[in-house]
Image (cartoon, rainbow, N blue to C red):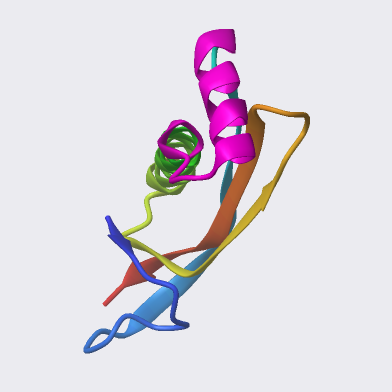
Amino acid sequence: MIIVNTETVPGMEIEKALGVVSGNVVLAKHIGKDIVGGLRGIVGGKMTEYEEMFRESREAAEKEMVQSAERLGADAIVNIRYSSSSIMSGSSEVLVYGTAVTLK
């Protein structure tokens, strides 16, 4: 599956737009990592616990989006966009969406 954040796939022609596909995931870290991340917020430093949570959220949301596109018979997803928000302390929501297309 080709995934791009541009309106077209370079060097290829879009045959048909199949519709918008998306993936949405809300993840939370367990209390231990949330406490460690909170302490880093006080004393400073790279918050690897939260970076890991966001990375996992993005990957899971992308996987959902790709599965939706595959069900439609898509070859690619173009013009993808990400959105994220915090539901509560120690959790993240990631939404990724784009247009599923077939290529010539």
Which residue is at a point 44% across and 81% down the rendered structure image?
A: 6
On-image quarter of the N terminus: bottom left
Residue 87, located in which quarter of the rendered image? top right
**Residue 11 shown left or right of residue 19 in the figure:** left
Given residues 80 and 68, the one toward you in this image is: 80
Percent coordinates x, y for residue 90 in the rendering:
65, 27
Q: Measured from the top left, where is residue 103 in percent x and y? A: 30, 72
Q: Position of residue 21 (x, y in %)?
A: 56, 52
Instruction: Check the image and report above or below for 59 versus 82.
Output: above
Q: Residue furthest bottom?
A: 11
Most extreme residue toward the front is: 43
Q: Would you say 56 lies left or right of 86 here?
A: left
The quarter of the displayed image where residue 24 is located: top right
Name above or below for residue 4 compared with residue 58.
Answer: below
Q: In which quadrant will I find the C terminus?
A: bottom left
Instruction: Answer with left or right where residue 6 lies relative to residue 81.
Output: left
Q: Is residue 62 above or below residue 89?
A: below
The prevailing secondary structure element of the residues shown in magenta is helix
67, 60: nearer the viewer: 60
Q: Residue at x 57, y 56 (%)?
A: 97
- Left or right of 25 in this view: 86: right
Camera-side residue: 79 or 75?
79
Residue 67: image location, x then y, percent: 41, 38
Q: Is residue 7 magenta?
A: no
Residue at image point 60% right, 44% down: 94
Instruction: Judge whether 29 appears above or below 98 on screen.
Output: above
Residue numbers of the magenta segment: 31-50
